Amino acid sequence: MSQKNYQIDQDQLVAELKAKKPEAMSYLYDNYSGAIFGAILRIVGEESIAEEVLQDAFMKFWNKIDQYDSSKGRFFTWMINISRNLSIDRLRSKELKKAGKTDDIRDYVTGITDSNSSDQQTDAIGVKELMKDLRDEEKFILEMVYFKGYSQSEIAKEFNIPLGTVKTRLRMALKNMRKVLKLE
Amino acid sequence: MNIEEYISSGILESYVLNELPLAERLEVEQMADVHAEVREEIEKIEASIEALAFRSSVQPPASIKETILQKIEGKNTPVINIDRKESAVSALKYAAAASILLALASGIAAFNYFTKWKSAEGRLADLVAQNQQFADNYNKVNQQLDNIQEAVGIMNNAAYTRVVMEGTDNSPNSLATIYWNQNTQDVFLSIQNLKELSQDQQYQLWAIIDGKPVDAGVFDPDNSTFLVQMKSIRSGAAAFAVTIEPRGGSENPSLETMQVLGNT
């Protein structure tokens, strides 16, 4: 399925989820669980915990779908933010946060992309490739935010980088990635 | 506000990542409503994050899907257990009792939600008003900053002749300054100290050219603007003076009311 079809499908999918159709949930799972699970796994680190969080996340999508407002943004953004929050809550509650975050980030980024190239997205470009044009400091912020679930203010505090700098680096990272993603 | 600066501050990324406090979130949503480029930028950021997530997919175990579907289907189809041996009358009784209960329960729920909705609406209105006030204040401060910048530019510009007008015997403490560009003929007035006037009076600035007073415009003793642009005065003015005149100004100055005077 191409990226474009997703967008058309997202609206329809949301409508059917709001109508509480189980088939919509099945479709949602088939098409989005990989992307969501990847994001959760990279934050919580442990597969068994990630599976629990994934279940919680999908139940939350189902139960809270009426709170999703398409005028405030894409459906995927809504889902990924719920998933990130659940992952971070789980980390905090289990006090795994420190242990998880001290692992070498590179293991996750490269390891996961190299061993899982057969996902829904058959595109051969992996995360590593996506990030190849980023400067090191941009890559670092993106990895901390996206792959480890840090908030920007946490990064600022923990690594002693001014918050404004964190924000502009994240912005440049996402912006530079657009070229590889062919979004502009 | 400069939209490019707003976008490049990274606030939109924080918005998409849901890291903003409510007030700032509302601000971003307002900006997105007003400025198409903000809306487009948000969409691009969302698309990047979505694409990144798909590029880094990890397939979860298939068993999870089954668990989730069982959970939601269990929730969706309530178990109905009707005892068919019961008489029609008692079934009716149950139905009547159930419908009364249902009516009661939904009445309470409706009231409950209505109250919650009302209070949420009130809070939202407060926030919107607060937000509006922030925006107004911001604009006011911004405007003032623009005024100051413009004033500083003029005061520092060597093309402007600075004429200090000191208080006359009528009002020894009064003080005002003229910045006059003889090339462009622009005249700016800066008020240091002028007394309040009654509603039907106004100050009037005069340039003295070849011994004759030339009207340079009326003004109110308002300290909120740093420099007030007056009427243009061609080169040749030997002095500037301010008199008190009836609101709207006079053709000829009432010299006996002169407040300040300065030679160029």
Image: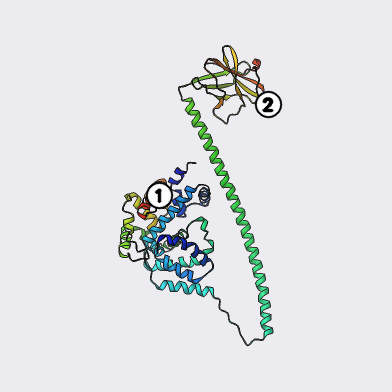
Q: Residues within 10 Å of mark 2 (few under 14, many from 20)?
A: few
Depth check, front residue: B151 or A69? A69
Which residue position holds label 1?
A171
Depth check, front residue: B236 or B60? B236
Task: Identify the disc placed on residue B198.
Answer: 2
Residue A63 visible in this rendered orientation of the protein: no
Q: What coloring was used for the rendering? A: rainbow
Q: Are marks 1 and 2 in contact (CB under 8 Å)?
A: no
- What is the residue that sits farthest to the top in this orientation? B211
- What is the residue that sits farthest to the bottom in this orientation? B85
Q: Nearer the viewer, mark 1 or mark 2?
A: 1
Q: Residues within 10 Å of mark 1 (few under 14, many from 20)?
A: many
Secondary structure at numbered mark 2 = loop
Disc 1 residue type? Arg
Position of residue A41 relative to residue A137, above or below, is below
Q: CA distance from mark 1 to mark 2?
A: 57 Å
Q: Could you tell me residue A149's position as x and y percent?
A: 40, 57
Task: Identify the disc placed on residue A56.
Answer: none
Q: Could you tell me residue A116's position as x and y percent?
A: 33, 65
Q: Quadrant of residue B120?
A: bottom right
Position of residue B48 relative to residue B167, above or below, is below
Q: Could you tell me residue A122's position as x and y percent?
A: 35, 64
Disc 2 residue type? Ser
Residue drawn at (58%, 49%) of the image: B128
Depth check, front residue: B264 or A145? B264
Secondary structure at numbered mark 1 = helix
Q: Could you tell me residue B72's position as x and y percent?
A: 50, 72
Q: Quadrant of residue A128?
A: bottom left
